[in-house]
Amino acid sequence: MEHDQDITLSVNGTTVRRRVQPRQHLVDFLRDELGLTGSHTGCEHGVCGACTLRVDGQIVRGCLMLAVQANGCRVDTIEGLSDSKELAALQKAFHEKNALQCGFCTPGMLMAAQDLLLISRKPTREEIRNHISGNYCRCTGYQAIVDAIEEVVNGKG
Ligand code: FES
Ligand code: FES
């Protein structure tokens, strides 16, 4: 039998120490142990992007990464990026462009969009589409989401 493991990580800038089961996924750890339920679990197989998190500056699928693998890492969630106002322009644009309906995909979508804005100063519409292609939305048809991100790229968000 595998033993629980002690991990220490930074979550939204706060140091967290916990004993975790070796097979617990990072997104479940954040939701169930820390109450950070902004990251959603959809497919739990790395397909839908609802669980997107930032770990040491890179976006990852929280349903594919184990909590123990985040030991020593800095994890940023939708809650942290919202509180720090890093997502403020995107959130405003999503709201104004009606880029969310049920909102299930939105946290992951915002995390992916912000990742693009950090790595590309002026992405094209095509590049925006490509970058969010791993994030599924069942409601919007994507048009409004791409419009919202483009709005921020153009400095209007
Ligand atoms: S829940 Fe992680 S990719 Fe779907
Ligand atoms: S707004 Fe409902 S899944 Fe995207």
Image (tube, helix red, strand yellow):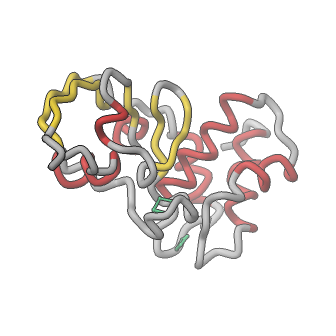
Of 47 and 90, nearer the camera is 47
- Where residue 17 sits in the image (x, y, percent)? 15, 28
What residue lies at 70% left-to-right and 49% top-to-bottom?
149
- Where residue 156 sits in the image (x, y, percent)? 72, 42
What residue lies at 49% left-to-right and 64% top-to-bottom?
45
- Where residue 140 sits in the image (x, y, percent)? 64, 74
Of 64 and 34, nearer the camera is 64
- Residue lying furthest bottom in this view? 139
Where is 66 relative to 132, above or below? above
Where is 37 relative to 116, above or below? below
What residue lies at 55% left-to-right and 67% top-to-bottom?
100
Where is 5 relative to 96, above or below? above
What residue lies at 40% left-to-right and 34% top-to-bottom?
76
Left or right relative to 114: residue 43: left
Number of numbered callouts drawn: 0
- Residue lying furthest front in this view? 1
- Where residue 2 sits in the image (x, y, percent)? 18, 45
Left or right relative to 57: residue 26: left
- Residue 146 sits in which quadrant? bottom right
- Residue 142 sits in which quadrant? bottom right
Tell me which image quadrant ligand 2 sits in. Answer: bottom right
* Image quarter hosting the C terminus: top right
Left or right relative to 84: residue 87: right
Left or right relative to 152: residue 58: left
- Residue 122 sits in which quadrant? top right
